[in-house]
Image (cartoon, rainbow, N blue to C red):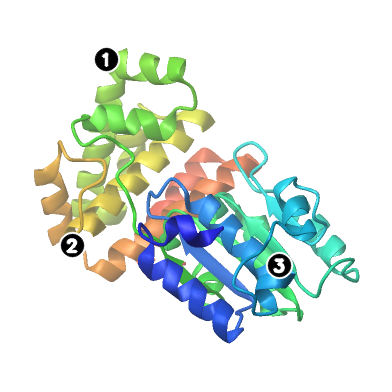
Amino acid sequence: MLEKFKTKQSIAYQIVSNTLKKKHYAHAYIIETRGYDEGFAFAFAFAKLLLCPHLNEGQPNCINCMQCKMINDGNFPELRIINPEGNWIKKEQLLELQEEFSKKSLIGNKKIYIINNAEKLNVNSANTILKFLEEPQEGIIAILVVENIYQLLQTIISRCQIITLNGQVTLVEEKTTLQKVGQLITNTNVDYENFISNEDSLNKIKAILRFIDYYEKNHKKILLYSNEYWFDYFNEKENIYQALLIVIYFYKDVLNYKLNCEIEIFNDYIEEIKKIAEMNTIIKLANKIKILYKNRSYLENNANLNLLFDRIIIEMEEGVL
């Protein structure tokens, strides 16, 4: 189960081991993967340990019991895995989960749900899961898997125990910023090749950096020049969705720089990162990232693009979360 992570994820492994040994379970956990590509596998192994009757009875090993077999086959009724449907995790998925988990357990005394890619909770689904976390029921444990806790509402974070994994660089260091951005915003090899071979892709990245630079220097004044610095390049829902993701990751790299961590994406733009870092505190950067994530989710609900742009700028200026 979790033994495969004992070396690579020694700290997280020890936290989980102590939890199981002491049987002091939180009602909700966040597994922060930080780029580690087996984050969901870690969460799944943790859930199996919580549900396995042999290990919870103090036995050192599970001899492939019936419950673990059912979990492996995806047939265990007390374990639900929520994955995004399309770009988002939908409110309806969580309402269905709550209804199902309101019923009496068929096997054992615990029910566990794993929300994979929890950064894809939109405004409605995030508020729905928040209500579930605010009124925890005995025997129900939540595990949220997310790349970075900044991608979640602070109110959700505050109700969970955080287990941070040792991240690994999944984007090869020798790759250019253009290639790394391509990996972030495309879903297929064909889309990726089209992106990195299109001369306009680099121009769009540079346009985003010009937008950030102008905004940081002039603040709300950019609202007067939204066409010049934004809508001349990004004027459709899909490419605005991608552009906001690029803005988010640029600010994350600025935050990485402030925290003396590795620059993940914008290694070709170190001077630009340094310049923006000088204009912001760590708290301001974290707030901006959260605001950008929150407003990006409004695109799903066919938000007015001009009003959305205005709201992002105003909220970042006022620090509204």
Q: Does residue 263 lie above or below 27 as drawn?
A: above
Q: Residues within 10 Å of mark 3 (few under 14, many from 20)?
A: many
Q: Which mark is residue 51?
A: 3
Q: Earlier in the sequence, mark 3 or mark 2?
A: 3
Q: Residues within 10 Å of mark 1 (few under 14, many from 20)?
A: few
| Label 1 residue SS | helix
Which callout, 1 or 2, points at the residue further toward the start of the chain?
1
> Dot 1 corresponds to which residue?
199
* Residue toward you, 92 or 35: 35
| Residue lying at the far left of the rendered structure | 271
**Mark toward the start of the polypeptide (3 vs 1):** 3
Query: Residue 193: which quarter of the image?
Result: top left
Q: In the drawing, does residue 135 fall left or right of residue 12?
A: right
Q: What x and y, as percent, mark residue 118?
A: 56, 54
Vertically, is 116 above or below 18?
A: above
Q: Label 2's element?
A: helix
The amino acid on which the numbered mark 2 sits, given as a three-letter code, is Lys
**In the foreground, 194 or 33:** 33
3 and 2 marks in contact (CB < 8 Å):
no
Vertical order, 85 against 114 (above or below): above
Residue 103, x across and y down, in percent:
90, 68
Circles 1 and 2: CB atoms closer than 8 Å: no
Please indicate whether residue 86 sits to the left or right of residue 279 in the image: right
Residue 26 in percent (x, y) is at: 60, 79
Q: Quadrant of the image for the N terminus?
A: bottom right
Which residue is rendered at x = 26% and y = 28% of the image? 178
As rendered, which of 160 and 285 lies closer to the eye? 160
Type of amino acid under label 3: Leu
Q: Which residue is mark 2?
A: 258
From the top left corner, tell me how far across and down residue 242 is, in percent. Answer: 43, 34
User: Between marks 1 and 2, how big is the CA–CA gap?
Assistant: 31 Å
